[in-house]
Image (cartoon, rainbow, N blue to C red):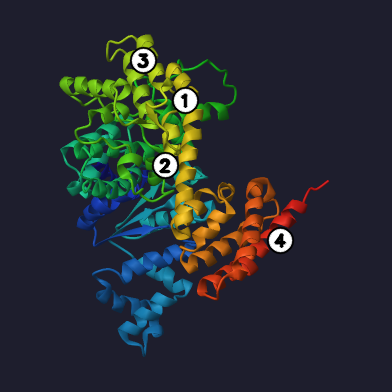
C-alpha cells in the first residue's frame, strides 16, 4: 500500500495537466508523516535539487510560514553557499560591509517583506512536504498557507508541494477543494502496521510474540502507527522484567502480555476508553469468554438519539478490543498501560502471568487455548485437585474462587464433561469447611477479577466473603499490633497507607504502649508524637476517629502518672516532649472536634 501511494503521489506531481500540488489525507496516526519522511522525500530529492519537510505545528502567521520556506531554501541546503551571491543581488546594499556571512545572518534574523517576496519568487527546482495543516491556529491561516503554496507552484519554476492533513479536522473543507485537483487517502493495512513495529523492535520480538502482535493487530484491524508504537513502548519494559523472573512461563507470558497491551492501548487511544471502562469490560468476559459482544447479549433497548447510538457503538468497540483469548487483563496492567501507575513490583501476581509448570494458572487466567490436549487434561486435573483436594495448608481465598469460576466456565461451555450441580455441591462443602480457605485481605485487582461470576459461584462467594473479610481484618490488625508495639518505624508505612482516616489506636492498651516505648528508638517516640498531633487537626475528625479518643487521653494520663518518677535520661526527656508538645495538643484537638454539633 505505501509503495503504491508513494508512486501515485510522484506521478500526480509529475502530471503537467495540473499544478504540482497534491493532498495526502489520512487519520491521525495512519503513517502520513512516516511515509513522507521515509519514502516520499527521498524520491523527491531524486527529481528536484532540493526537497524539504515542513511541519506547520507552532506556525502562527503567514510570515512564519514564509520564513520557513526561505530558511530551508537558502540556508539549509547544499547550495546555500552558492546562493549567497544571489541573496546579495536581491537585498542590495544590506550585504555591503558584512560579507557573505553577515548578509546571511542579517537575512535569517530579519527580512523586510519586499525582500522575502523577492526571495520566495526566486525559489526553483524545489519540492516541499507541508505537514500538520489541521494544527494551524485558524482556518484563515490554513487558507493563507494553501494560497501561498498554490502561488509558488503556479508562478515559480519547477516547484512542487505535497500537503499532509487529516481532512476530518479541517473546519473549512472548501479551501481544500479550491487548492487541490488531486488527493490521495492513506490507510495502512495490518501487515504494514506490523511491518513497522517489526522493523523498529525486531530484537524485542521472537516468533511467539510476533505472532501474538500480528494476531491482535489483524483482529482489531489496527491502522494507527502511533498507537502500536505506544503499545510497544509499554511492552518493552515489561518484557525486560519478565525475562528475569525465574518461575514464569516466559513464552506464554510474553505472548499474552503483548496481546493484552495492544488491546488496552488501542481501546484507550482509539476509543477513549478509561481505566474503569477497560476493567469493567475485562471482568465482563471473565465468565463468558467465548461470546463476542453483539446486540443479542442483553435486553433490547430503544436508542433514540444520535448521541446514544454513538455511545453504544463506542462501547461495542471497546468490548471488541478487550475480548481477549489470552486471559483477563488485570487492573494493574491497565493502570500501567495508561500511564496511571508505574510497573508494579509483584509482576507475576499483578499481571496474572502464567507460572512455569503450573497448568492450574493457565486455567485461572483463561489462557488455556494454546495448550495441547494432554496439557489441558493435566491442567483440569490440577484445577480439581486445588479446588477439592485435602491439603494441610488452607487455600488462598481469592485464588480458590478464581479457580472455581474458571472451572465452572469450562463445565458450562462443555470444555469438560462434568455435572455443574454436583460440582457446585462439592464447592459448597469446601466453603462451609472453616479450615479449607485461608482468610485474605481483599485487594482491588482480586475483587475486580471476580466480577460477573457464574450465578452459582457468585452465590458461594457472597456467602463466604463476610467471614473472610472479618477474619482477614482480625489477622491484619493482629499483625499491625505486633509491628506497632515492636517499633513505630516498622508499622508506620502500613498506618500511613491504610489507616489515614481509619481508627486503630483503640486496639491498644495505654499501659502496653507505655511499656513498648522503653524498647522504641527515641526518634520513633518523637515521630509518633508528631503523628498524634497532626492526626486530629481536621474539624470533622470525630466522624472517623472517635474510637481512638479514649486511648489518646488514657495514654496521656498514664504517662503523666509514670514519667515524673523516672530518673533523668534521654528516654524521660523524649517522653516529656511526647506529653507536653504532642499528646497535649492532640487532646485539645480532640476536645475541639467533640465540641462540634453538640446539642
Mark 3 or mark 1: which comes first in sequence?
3
Would you say 303 lies left or right of 447 here? right
Disc 4 and disc 1: Cα gap in Å? Answer: 43 Å
The foreground one among 306 and 528 is 528
Disc 2 and disc 4: Cα gap in Å? Answer: 52 Å
Residue 392 against residue 475 in the figure, above or below: above
> Is the residue under label 1 in contact with that under label 4 (CB below 8 Å)?
no
- Residue 288 point in image, percent of width and height: 38, 21
Mark 4 or mark 3: which comes first in sequence?
3
In the picture, the disc for residue 426 is 3
The foreground one among 384 and 527 is 527
Q: Quadrant of residue 337?
A: top left
Q: Secondary structure at mark 1?
A: helix
Disc 3 and disc 1: Cα gap in Å? Answer: 15 Å
> Is the residue under label 4 in contact with that under label 2 (CB below 8 Å)?
no
Mark 4 or mark 1: which comes first in sequence?
1
Report the mark closest to the observer, 1 or 2. 1
Q: Which residue is mark 2?
A: 269
Label 4 crowd bin: few (<14), some (14–19), many (20+), radius 10 Å: some
Mark 2 or mark 4: which comes first in sequence?
2
> Is the residue under label 3 in contact with that under label 2 (CB below 8 Å)?
no
Q: Which residue is mark 4?
A: 588
- Residue appearing at x 48%, y 28% in the figure: 465
Q: Secondary structure at mark 4?
A: helix
Mark 2 or mark 3: which comes first in sequence?
2
- Residue appearing at x 47%, y 44% in the figure: 478
> Is the residue under label 1 in contact with that under label 3 (CB below 8 Å)?
no
Q: Secondary structure at mark 3?
A: helix
Report the mark closest to the observer, 2 or 3. 3
Amino acid at each position: 500500500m505505501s509503495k503504491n501511494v508513494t508512486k501515485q503521489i510522484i506521478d500526480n506531481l509529475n502530471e503537467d495537466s495540473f499544478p504540482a500540488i497534491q493532498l495526502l489525507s489520512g487519520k491521525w496516526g495512519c503513517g502520513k508523516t512516516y511515509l513522507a519522511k521515509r519514502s516520499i522525500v527521498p524520491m523527491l530529492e531524486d527529481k528536484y535539487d532540493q526537497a524539504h519537510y515542513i511541519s506547520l505545528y507552532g506556525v502562527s502567521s503567514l510570515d512564519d510560514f514564509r520564513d520557513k520556506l526561505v530558511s530551508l531554501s537558502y540556508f539549509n541546503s547544499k547550495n546555500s553557499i552558492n546562493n549567497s551571491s544571489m541573496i546579495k543581488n536581491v537585498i542590495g546594499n544590506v550585504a555591503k560591509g558584512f560579507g557573505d556571512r553577515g548578509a546571511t545572518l542579517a537575512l535569517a534574523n530579519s527580512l523586510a517583506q519586499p525582500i522575502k517576496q523577492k526571495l520566495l519568487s526566486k525559489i526553483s527546482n524545489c519540492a516541499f512536504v507541508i505537514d500538520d495543516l489541521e494544527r494551524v491556529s485558524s482556518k484563515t491561516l490554513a487558507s493563507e498557507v494553501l494560497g501561498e503554496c498554490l502561488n509558488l507552484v503556479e508562478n515559480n519554476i519547477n516547484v512542487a508541494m505535497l500537503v499532509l492533513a487529516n481532512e476530518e479536522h479541517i473546519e473549512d473543507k472548501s479551501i481544500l477543494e479550491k487548492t487541490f485537483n488531486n488527493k490521495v487517502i492513506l490507510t495502512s493495512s495490518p501487515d504494514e502496521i506490523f511491518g513497522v513495529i517489526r522493523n523498529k523492535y525486531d530484537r524485542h520480538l521472537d516468533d511467539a510474540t510476533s505472532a501474538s502482535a500480528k494476531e491482535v493487530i489483524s483482529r482489531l484491524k489496527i491502522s494507527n502507527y502511533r498507537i502500536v508504537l505506544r503499545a510497544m513502548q509499554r511492552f518493552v519494559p515489561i518484557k525486560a522484567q519478565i525475562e528475569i523472573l525465574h518461575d514464569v512461563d516466559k513464552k506464554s507470558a510474553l505472548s499474552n502480555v503483548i496481546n493484552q497491551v495492544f488491546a488496552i492501548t488501542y481501546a484507550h487511544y482509539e476509543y477513549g476508553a478509561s481505566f474503569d471502562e477497560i476493567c469493567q469490560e475485562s471482568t465482563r468476559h471473565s465468565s463468558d469468554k467465548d461470546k463476542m459482544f453483539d446486540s443479542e447479549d442483553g435486553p433490547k433497548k430503544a436508542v433514540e438519539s444520535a448521541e446514544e447510538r454513538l455511545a453504544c457503538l463506542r462501547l461495542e468497540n471497546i468490548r471488541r478490543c478487550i475480548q481477549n483469548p489470552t486471559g483477563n487483563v488485570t487492573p494493574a496492567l491497565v493502570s500501567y498501560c495508561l500511564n496511571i501507575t508505574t510497573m508494579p513490583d509483584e509482576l507475576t501476581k499483578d499481571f496474572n502471568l502464567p507460572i512455569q509448570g503450573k497448568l492450574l494458572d493457565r486455567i485461572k487466567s483463561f489462557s488455556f487455548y494454546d495448550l495441547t490436549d494432554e496439557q489441558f487434561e493435566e491442567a483440569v486435573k490440577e484445577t480439581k485437585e486445588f479446588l477439592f483436594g485435602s491439603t494441610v495448608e488452607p487455600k488462598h481465598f481469592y485464588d480458590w474462587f478464581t479457580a472455581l469460576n474458571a472451572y465452572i466456565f469450562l463445565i458450562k461451555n462443555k470444555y469438560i464433561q462434568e455435572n455443574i450441580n454436583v460440582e457446585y455441591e462439592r464447592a459448597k462443602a469446601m466453603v462451609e469447611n472453616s479450615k479449607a480457605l485461608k482468610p485474605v485481605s481483599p485487594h482491588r485487582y482480586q475483587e475486580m477479577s471476580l466480577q460477573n461470576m457464574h450465578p452459582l459461584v457468585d452465590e458461594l462467594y457472597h456467602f463466604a466473603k463476610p467471614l473472610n473479610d472479618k477474619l482477614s481484618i482480625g489477622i491484619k490488625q493482629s499483625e499491625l499490633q505486633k509491628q506497632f508495639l515492636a517499633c513505630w518505624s516498622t508499622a508506620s508505612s502500613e498506618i500511613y497507607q491504610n489507616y489515614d482516616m481509619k481508627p486503630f489506636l483503640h486496639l491498644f492498651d495505654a499501659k502496653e504502649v507505655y511499656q513498648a516505648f522503653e524498647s522504641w528508638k527515641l526518634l520513633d517516640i518523637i515521630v509518633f508524637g508528631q503523628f498524634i498531633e497532626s492526626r486530629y487537626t481536621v474539624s470533622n475528625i470525630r466522624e472517623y476517629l472517635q474510637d481512638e479518643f479514649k486511648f489518646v487521653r488514657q495514654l496521656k494520663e498514664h504517662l503523666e502518672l509514670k514519667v515524673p518518677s523516672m530518673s533523668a535520661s534521654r528516654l524521660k526527656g523524649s517522653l516529656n516532649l511526647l506529653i507536653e508538645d504532642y499528646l497535649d495538643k492532640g487532646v485539645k484537638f480532640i476536645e475541639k472536634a467533640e465540641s462540634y454539633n453538640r446539642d
